Image: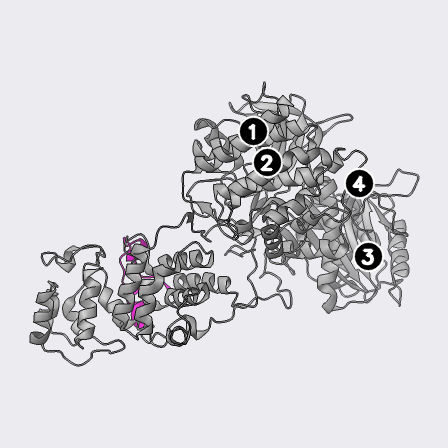
Amino acid sequence: MSVLLLTLKTASQQGQIKPGNTHTKPVDTVLLSPFMMQHRIPVCPSAIRHGFSHPLDLLGPLPWLWPCVLKSSQRAEENTDTIFGIRIIAENPLGDALKNIRIKLRHGDDVLSESIVASLLGALVTSSAALDLPAPDGTTDVAEKLFIIRRNVRRGTLKLGNFKPLIDVVVTNSTDAEIWAAVIELINTVPPPSTIAPTFKGTPVKTSSSRLADSETRDIVEGELFEEIKNCTFRNVKGFCDKFFDPKTWRREQKAMLRAIMTAHNGETWIEFPSTPDEKPVWDWLWSLEDRFLTNAPHKLYTTRTANQFKERKGQMDIFWQTPATNANDTFEYKQVLVVGEQKKSYDTGRFKATLLQLARYVRGVFADQPTRRFVHAFSLCASTMELWVFDRSGPYSSGPFDIHDEPDKFARALVGYATIDDDAMGLDTFIERGDACRHVTLDDASGNKMRVRLDKAIVRQRAIVCRGTTCYRTQNNQVAKFSWASDKRKLEAEQLKLAEQRGVKGVARLVAYRQITTIVELREGLEFPERHPFRGETVHFEDPPSATGSTNTSSHKRESSSDNTSDNASGPKKRRSNSQKSRLATELNDELSIGKAKPSLYTPSEDPWENRIYSCLLVSPAGRVISEFMTIKELLESMRDAIKVHQSLYIAGNILHRDISSNNIIITQPETAEGFKGMLIDLDLAKVRDSGPSGARHQTGTMQFMAIEVLRTADHTYRHDLESFFYVLLWMCARQSWDNGFGGKEEPPRDSILRKWEIGTLKHIANAKVGHMTVNGLEEVMDEFPDIFDVVKPLCLKIRSIMFGETARLNIGTPSSDPDELYRAIITAYDEVIDALIKN
């Protein structure tokens, strides 16, 4: 036990230091000197020279070396690692923080429970002293150590007998000094955890509508879209109309159309605008304007008359612009749509959110079928109130609402603009060169030379708005061209691929050529953005934690001042915490206790009004088929196994963590062209160098179906989480994709797959569903959805479940503290055994 704590305990027992006593009365030096000499405590010279009114002032800064004996030869001023240990405890008394717990312990039976131990540790964790006292090993503070111990108590991985000494001093109403001495003893004696404690400092995860099929219900799609756009929507953006509909930059024909259409306004109102603005009369009026004034415009206005005029199930738009339709059967396709609109017969501010989400649903469909489009124009016309919108990969922004009668110029400019603006102003892709029979892109190879590449079939695309918009094409030379909008806060994928190659990583795609195309900053140049639009009822508040979990601190101002005076070169636990740092641990504890009724959004706004993204094209080699296109069980298992080997090389040799394992990022390859691998990893957009800090990006989107439980619960990503994602990909391929690939034969696929719970709902609900499915009984339910031919894979799934989650009743979802290679080897060996059995049979 620490000599310093023994010193403090002795002083407390002698009545020289009492919890809560401010010690403002002068103290006789003679009384303290024998005590200090007995325990060899150095006296602060400045206190002797200048006098003192506090006995702790006499002690000066004590060398807080927990496991060591204090040496009188050490002067406080010469020790840069000193901390006011006694002062911290004296000035931050526990007070009544343990009162309720002490009562429960006294009136309870002799058998300790996880609940009461966790409550005691929770109260100590949030105390001010714990947040300031350094831990015995000097790596962090006491609060962090107690937080980890408490988490392991909740998981049932610690013997409750370890806590008996601490319980005894709490029950007997011992002094604060004795309680903290017992705490330090506990930290020193509790065995280290078998798993690494999760951290919550990285880029938060954000849900994406990309995981939803086009056939999903409107409510589900719009619910996901709201999560995408709710913190990146802007209205009343200055410069909007001048940027997109500026007559000064128009051709003579466009200006003539604008002058002509303005003749339909009499100075007060649009002459023929219907008095009752129902849909049909308004459409007829718009058509009349087009027929009279926009006859020669390249883009035409259309409406739908029936519910099934669009081929795809992405929603039936009320009104939209596209190039003139050439089909005779009067059906439309999202890949032809240029501008989407929504018309209502009345303007109701209470319906703003619903109208915006309708537009967003249509825009999502446009991006899905025009995946390399840069942005999409949209508008709403509710009675005579119009709002012009642009949706890009960082979210929607608008002109703000205006009355078309009062501001006819805005309306006329928008109408002429939608009908006539060029591809660049329309947000269409102008980077891909489109010929009669093929498409090409021009990139820069490793030597800086231009390289013209022909694009073939699109093999990957995303169905979302605010996302990276990843789109991959196979090229003519067995390579892949990948387009994506990556956050400018992240290391670019091209750099990650170069780094992996330099470090000798095996099995990761090789960079062939690259070109940066544009950025969101460039697309939004000249615009002034206000504050984000505050959707009503969406503000999240935390409840204050109950007083039982922390102590009332009457000297917080004094401690803040001390923190302000801490030198810049102090680090780690030696440096006093700010209030925000202290509240973080309390917030994490509250999350575990489910104290707060409302949870914060996983989309964490930064100081920038919106996130800048860099649009680029990568050419990588070799090409392959995505794992979902597997044709045999052996091909599936070999590709999965080799992709895990690639991940191991990337993590161990390359020191890079992938963080986005999904069915789109594992490809089936020919070993002759892929360094002997039958499966490889692609897409390092979200990858990061191990142990590096947060990128600064606002969020990261992943594929919810394959995301690890702890990541869904916002813990920072580890290699084990990626291995868990590999397991979910395997299960998904067997239980869902296998039916689409024809492995069911005459069997009927399950009508309502339980894996639907992995793709629908909040992150919390998806995490809880996976917890249930990763029990033995839950996994057997999942495997019941395999086609019969996949029975051979079931032992592998059970083995991996055991390796990943353990054999205890409580799932082990944490990351092992052992050598990562151990977990990789165990999983790869499990695959090898099943693959060998398949080959033999």
Nearest to N terminus: mark 1 or mark 4: 4
Q: Picture quarter containing residue 388?
A: bottom right
Nearer to me, 254 or 800: 800
For the residues marked 2 and 4, what is the alpha-carbon distance in whole angstroms? 24 Å
For the residues marked 3 and 1, what is the alpha-carbon distance in whole angstroms? 77 Å
Nearest to N terminus: mark 3 or mark 1: 3
Can you give x and y, in whole percent of width and height, for residue 346 in the image? 81, 67
Residue 796, which numbered label?
2
Camera-near label (1 vs 4) is: 1
Residue 833, which numbered label?
1
SS for dot 4: loop
Can you give x and y, in whole percent of width and height, for residue 774 in the image? 59, 48
> Height in image: 708 above or below 229?
above
SS for dot 3: helix
Magenta stretch: give its range: 557-578
Q: Are marks 1 and 2 in contact (CB under 8 Å)?
A: yes
Can you give x and y, in whole percent of width and height, for residue 518 in the image? 59, 39
Q: Are marks 4 and 3 in contact (CB under 8 Å)?
A: no
Looking at the picture, which amino acid does disc 4 mark?
Glu
Residue 748, which numbered label?
4
**Taking the image as drawn, is residue 601 in sight?**
yes
Q: Which residue is mark 3?
A: 262
**Taking the image as drawn, is residue 431 in sight?**
no
Pick out the residue farthest to the top.
672
For the residues marked 2 and 3, what is the alpha-carbon distance in whole angstroms? 72 Å
For the residues marked 4 and 3, what is the alpha-carbon distance in whole angstroms? 62 Å
> Height in image: 490 above or below 292?
above
Nearer to me, 841 or 581: 841
